[in-house]
Structure formats: C-alpha cells, structure tokens
Amino acid sequence: MNNRILVCVGTSGVSAGAEKVAANFRSELEQRGLGDSWELVRTGDRGLFRDVLVDIITPELGRVTYEFVKPEDVAELCEKHIARGEAVERLKAGSDYEKFFAGQTRIALSNCGEIDPEDIEAYIALDGYAALKKALGMTQEQVIDEVKRSGLRGRGGAGFPTGLKWELTWKEKSDEKYMVCNADEGDPGAFMDRSILEGDPHSVLEGMAIAAYATGANHGYVYCRAEYPLAVKRLRKAITQATQKGYLGENILGSGFSLDIQVKEGAGAFVCGEETALMASIEGARGMPKPRPPYPSQSGLWGKPTTINNVETLANVRHIILRGAQWYASIGTEKSKGTKVFALAGKVKNTGLVEIPMGTTIRDLIFGPGGGMVNRRRKIKGIQIGGPSGGCLPESLLDTPIDYESITKTGAIMGSGGFVVMDTSTCMVDIARFFLSFTVAESCGKCVPCRVGLQRMLEVLEKITAGKGTAEDLEFLAKMGESVKDTALCGLGNTGPNPAITTMKYFADEYKAHIEEKRCPAHVCVDLVDFEVDEEKCTKCGLCFKACPTGAVQWKPKEFARIEMEKCIKCKACIAACNFDAIH
C-alpha cells in the first residue's frame, strides 16, 4: 500500500498523546471513506523527543515528517495533506530533525519508528528471522566464529567480546544451558533498551535465538524492568507470535533446535543489572552479587552454564549474521567495532536516542545529532558519560573518540550509553554528590567497600557542598575512591566512585572554590549562595521576577531587578530563568 501514516506510539509518544493522535487518524480516515486505501502504522519511538512524531507517505509528496503533533491537529493534516495533497508547513519537522538523523548509522535502531512492533509480518517483511534461518544452517562453531570476527562487544557497559562469551558457554558440558537477555536498564536517563523492546522486540528475540543455538541453550529469559510496562507487553506479544510462527518453541524451523523464552520482571533494583545479582533475582532470591569465578558461562542460572547479553548487543546479532562479520567490522575503530546507542540528554538542543559509529568524537556527537547547546550563551562545562557510575569529562576532552579504550583512558567508562551534557550553570561538585547519592541508595549492602565506603564519600561531598569542607577531605575522597574501586565485590562498587574521582581530577578549581573560598561558582549549592543581581549583566528583562515563587525578586519594566533576601527561599528559580548569568 503506497499511502501510509506512521505514528510513533512508544512511551515518550504516549506521554505526549500519541494514542489519541492515532485514534483520531483512524476516525478521520473512516469518516472520509479512506480506511481501505490508507495504512495506519503504530510504531515505537524513533528516538528524537519531538513527540508526537507523524509521517505521512504518499507517491505525490513522498515522506513528510511532522513533529509536536497534537490530537487536535489531525483534522487539519487529513484535510490538507491527505485530501488535498498539501503539506502542513507549520507542523513540518525542520532542519534540526534532519540534522539529528543525518549523523547517525542506525543498526540496532534501524526498525524503531519504522514498523509496527506488534505485527510480526512487518518484521518478517524486512528480513526478520532470516538471520535465524541462516544460522540454523550453520554449525555452532561457524555462528560463534562469525560473531567473533565481527568484533561485537557487549553494549551493557563492560565491553566484553560477545563471540568469546558465547564460546565459553558453548565449550561447557552440561545437560542444560540458559540464555538470558539483560533488559534491567536502571541508569537514570538511559532508555536504549526500552526503546528497542518497544519498537523492535523481534530483533532481540531473534538475537537470543541465534545466541541460544550457538551456545547450546534451550531455555531463555528476558529480565526486564517492571517500570517498562509497554516494553513488557510488546515483548510478551512478540514471544507469542514468534512461537506461533515456529521461530520459537519446539523444533524451530524443523532444525531439531528448541528454545522457550520467558519474561521475568525486575523489582526496580539497580544492582540487578549486574549479571550475578540478575540471576539470583530470576531464581527468586534477593538480587545480590556473588564473587566470580565461577563465571556465568561456567555456573549461572541454577548452577548451569549461562550466557547473558544485553538488549542492544542482541539487536545487532541478526545484522551480523545476515550481512557478514566483515561488513560489521568495517564500522568503528580497530578495537571497538560497530555502532553504539547513546541516550543524549542535558543542555543540548536535540535530546533522544542517537546511534553513531564507534570512534565518533564527543564533539561531533554534541554538535552533530545533538545540534549544539540549547543556550548558546553558555559554554559546555562537562559531559557525564556512562551513567551514575561513569565519569565527568571536561570541555578540553571533547575531541576524545567514543570507543572503549579512549573513554577508559579518561577515567570514565562507556557504560550502557548514558550521555549528559552540562553547561556553566552546573556545579560539578554537586553533580558528584548527586550521583554518589544514587549509588549509595542502590547498593545492595553486601560488601563493606560499597556499603560503607560510598556512604563515607557521600558524607564528605555533602560536607563540601555545605561549605564545611577541608583540604583533608579531598585526600580522603581520593584514597577512599581508589580503595572502593579495588575491593568492591561487583561493578556497582567498582565504578561508584568514578563521579567523585573524575570531577576532582578535571574540575579541581571548583572543589577549591567550595573549600577555600566557601563559594559555589555555578551558584548551585544553596548553603554557599547569597543572591544578588549583577547590574552590569542584567538586561532588565524581568524573567527572574516572573520565575520567583515568593515575590523576593523586585522588578519594574526598564529597571534592574533586586532581591529581598528575607523573602528568598534559595530555590534558584531566578538563576534558572536568567539567560545572562546576572544573578550571583
């Protein structure tokens, strides 16, 4: 069918009214007698947060993308675009939309926002399950070798070679083996796994089936956050459809290979992203890490050999099998092959999911798909990469290539793909405090370095942001940070100190200002802030007056603002509203 309407109905789309937009399109088409000549496709999210995104595709106008579509806009779109063949200019996506996608190489995200994730036929039409058919005609060794030669590494954070992980499980002798998909995406601001599961669940199931065949597993689990209800719903529907079609279940495609897959919903524990804690949770125990060795490939679920890959890793597998290891290895760098999906957030113009080749620089990501800073008067101060236990890098490292080796050298980690851009309004000491508070809250408490060490580091950071820090506190943070990294039981503790360590390394002047001058240069730490207006910078715009909730800001048109401190509650609404850094 040539006439199609695509509505992005993922979690971000739903929150903006996508369900009503889709329903209104259906109603308008039926009222106009066009229900049989138009195909309405409910896709997952495409990645750019300009919801609701709608594409109208016709032979006459080609593909036209509309952004920020509201339910009440549907009638106009149907009248002008569908009935009269005229694009609605006021809703058309502009150059930012084109720029966001122009710099991407979409592999794992290739189907997201393009097909109906609840229709297996739409997936099959785009070579869906063709890779599984091809893999079943190969030996296990051949499949593993293909993945090894591709250079695919785990996208969940550690970057362990995927083919080697499969090989380790395959070599183990056991009457039973397991295949697990880690979809416990707990990093604040990370939503790569959610979007893939909502927009293209069959690609993950196909990747799991290929991995299970290669390793000799006949039972699979997808461990998914319960906070992702739409992903869980679509995943379960996809499992049912794939089983009915013979791509899962007994004797898959007549090959003699069988695989059943179940969905296990997590209970919101960040630590369950660690594979041994994840397996304990599947088994019904409390999600707490275990010492390694033995590794999951030797003794995993219920003591059996187990392979664990994350969602993004598995979404790449079908493309490697279909297009070949050499094709995939041609993308990226020598040691970091392929692409990586990042959840781009913070002070950039375009936020959302970005899939770029490994080796792309931080600068090219921010000023390419990211579109540059949202407030061009404020410069980049830092980049938080790798999630809450990643690291904060300064502007001077913007030309660092984004690959496992280069990012690790900076003291940060690639992580699962969190990427937060911060400008001069951000206090890096407070950022370190914020992320330490998260890891302390999410620690399972099993080992002393994590349970006690991170808590002590947090207390010191709170002391510094309150203006009570000393030079000895910095020495303590450095020593305790290294001790926790070296002795904690799992990855949460090993990487938990990273925000403090990297901010002390790259933003030492801010720590000095907090400790020696009792001053927060970014005006964030309220205990160190007395509010006053700098008349040399004030433009008399009145934005601070409008933002103040207590009437503390006094202002009249064409006059400088001033602040009555007896009314001020230090909420910082005036600072956030001022675009000229005029409030000190």
Image: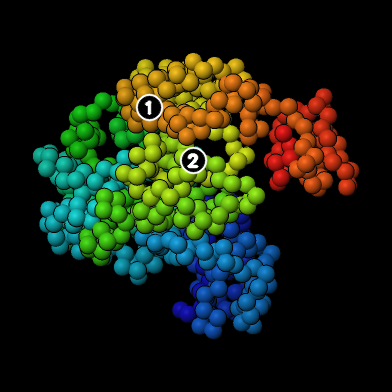
Q: Nearer the viewer, mark 2 or mark 1?
A: 2
N-terminal of the pair, mark 2 or mark 1, is 2
Q: Is residue 135 left or right of residue 74?
A: left
| 369 is higher (above) or lower (below) than 501 | below
Q: Is residue 501 left or right of residue 260?
A: right
**At numbered mark 1, what does the secondary structure look like: helix, strand or loop?**
helix
Name the residue at 42% across, 36% down: 390
Q: Is residue 435 left or right of residue 466?
A: left
Foreground residue, 446 or 552?
Answer: 552
**At numbered mark 2, what does the secondary structure look like: helix, strand or loop?**
strand
Residue 188 image offset from top left, x and y in percent: 49, 39
Do labels 2 and 1 touch, CB within 8 Å?
no
Disc 2 marks which residue? 394
How are the residues colored?
rainbow
| 261 is higher (above) or lower (below) than 7 | above
Foreground residue, 263 or 459?
Answer: 459
- Disc 2 crowd rating (10 Å Cα; few below 14, some 14-19, many 20+) is some
Disc 1 marks which residue? 493
Residue 424: mark: none
Name the residue at 56% across, 30% down: 510
Residue 173 image offset from top left, x and y in percent: 10, 39
Image quadrant for the C terminus? top right
Q: Amino acid at mark 2?
A: Pro
Residue 376 image offset from top left, x and y in percent: 63, 52
Residue 398 image offset from top left, x and y in percent: 46, 48
Q: Is residue 258 visible?
A: no
